[in-house]
Image (tube, helix red, strand yellow):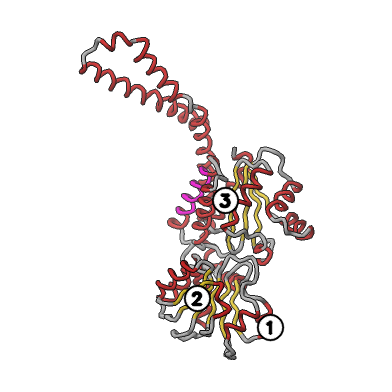
Amino acid sequence: MLTYLHTIAFTHRKFDLTKIGMLHIELNEQATRLKSVKAALELDEFLFLSTCNRVEISFIRKKTVDSAFFSKLLKALYPNLTAAELEGFVANLEHYQNRVAIQHALAVASSIDSMIIGEREIITQVRNAYEHCSANGLTGDSMRILMKHVIETAKKVYTQTSIATKPVSVVSLAYQQLKKLNIALDARIILIGAGATNTTMSHFLKKHGYKNFVVFNRTLAKAELLAEALKGTGIALSEIHNYTGGFDVIITCTGADHHLISLEIYEQLLQGETSKKAIIDIAIPQDLDPQIGEKYKLTHVSVEFLQQISNQNLKERSKEIDHVQRILTAASEAFELRIKERQVEIAMKAVPKQVKDIKTAALNDVFKDEIENMDAASREVLEKVIAYMEKKYISGPMKMAKEILLKND
C-alpha cells in the first residue's frame, strides 16, 4: 500500500507563516472535516499534521494523483479559499511520493527538515497527529507501520547525535528574548492559551523566578489547571474584554484562525497605561492584530522573528546533519525490509487458521475414537504435543519465508 503513499507539504521554505496559518484546522474540527474528505476523494488512509511552521497532508490513494487532484483536495478541505489562494497553494506545494515520502517523514520527525533544526517538539507533534488521526479511524495498517518506524528512528537520532544540543526551540528562543528586555520578576504576565507551548513557556518562566500570572483559555477548566500550577488566576477567554488587572507581558499561543487580540481588546487590557509592553506571540496565524503595533509602543516577538534568530545557530548544528542523514538512510533501507516482512505476514495470515482447522479435525473426527479410549495422563501428553506442533507449524513457515526474503534481499 505504501507504493501509493503521497505527502503534500506547505512549509517555511515556500510560504510565509501567515499563509501556512490559513491551512491550520482546529483539533476539534479535524475529525469531521478529514473524514468527509477521506470518503469523498476515496483515500485509503489519511494523516494531517499541523505545526507552527508547516502543514502536511499524507494519504494513500490508488487512483491518479496530480495537480488537478491536489486542487480538489484543498478545495474540499478549505472551501473558503479564494481561487487565487487555491492556485497559489497548489503551485507551490511540495509533493513527495512512495519511497521519497517515507524519507521525508523520517526527516521531518528527526527535525532536520524543521525551521529550527534539532527542535525536539516535532517528534511529539508527529506522534500526536498520528494518534489523533488513528483514534478517528483515518489511518490503517500502512500508516501504523510507517509512523512506528518514524518515531523509533527520530528517538535514535536524538539519542545518538547532538543535533538537539543547545536547544533553540520556540520556547527557549522566546525566553531568551524576554530575558534581554530585563523584565522584572514581579511583572504582570498574561498567558493567552493553555496548550502545550504556553504550558512549557510558563513553567520555564516560573522556574526562573517569575510569579505573577493570569491565564486565559477558551476552556475555563484548562485555564484554571495551568493557573493553579503557577499560583496564578485562571479566567475564561470569553471574559478577556472585562479584565482590568493590566499587564506588562502578554504571551499568546492559541489555535485560533484569526487575530485573537483585536485593537479593542488590547486597549481594554492596557487600562490606559502608556508604558512600553512586551508581546510574545508564537501563534500561527499570529494572535496579535498588526494594527496594535502601529498605534502603540510595544516589543513584539513573533515566530518569524524567532526564525531569524534560529538561523544563527544552524552552523553549530549543521555538522551533525551528516550523522543524522546516515541514520535516516539506514532507517529508510530497514523500513523497506520491514514492509516486505509485513507483506509476508499478510500473505500467510491464513496459515494459523488452517493449522487450527487441521488440529480440530484430527481431534474431533479422524482420531476421535482413539482419543476417547486414552487415559487422562496420555491425553494430557497428546494435547501438549499437539499444542507444541501447532505453535511450530504456525511460526515455522513464517520464519522460513522471512529468511528467504532476507537472503534474496
Question: Which residue shows up at 52% across the image and 82% down it?
Answer: 180
145 relative to 316, above or below:
above
- The amino acid sitting under disc 1 is Glu
- The amino acid sitting under disc 2 is Tyr
- Inspect the magenta stretch and tell me whether residue 213 lies in it: no
Point out the frontmost of discs 3 and 1: 1
Q: Residue 175 carries which label?
A: 2
Q: Earlier in the sequence, mark 3 or mark 1?
A: 3
Query: Picture coordinates of residue 139 (x, y %)?
Result: 56, 44
Q: What element carries label 1?
A: helix
280 relative to 160, above or below:
below
Q: What stretch is highlighted in magenta?
A: 144-155
Q: Residue 105 carries which label?
A: 3
Q: In the visual, does 122 lie left or right of 365?
A: right
Q: Which mark is residue 150?
A: none
Residue 159 quadrant: bottom left
Point out the frontmost of discs 1 and 2: 1
323 relative to 68, above or below:
below
Q: Residue 294 carries which label?
A: 1
Q: Earlier in the sequence, mark 1 or mark 2?
A: 2
- The amino acid sitting under disc 3 is Ala
Question: Which residue shows up at 27% across the image and 11% down it?
Answer: 372
* Type of secondary structure dominating the magenta stretch: helix
Q: Do the numbered discs 3 and 1 sit on residues whose CB atoms are within 8 Å?
A: no
Q: Which of marks 2 and 3 is nearer the N terminus?
A: 3
Query: Picture coordinates of residue 403 (x, y %)?
Result: 45, 30
Of residues 68 and 374, the one drawn nearer to the viewer in this rendering = 374
Residue 360 quadrant: top left
Cα distance in 3D space between marks 3 and 1 = 40 Å
Cα distance in 3D space between marks 2 and 3 = 30 Å
Of residues 192 and 268, the one drawn nearer to the viewer in this rendering = 268
Placement of the N terminus among the 4 image quadrants: top right
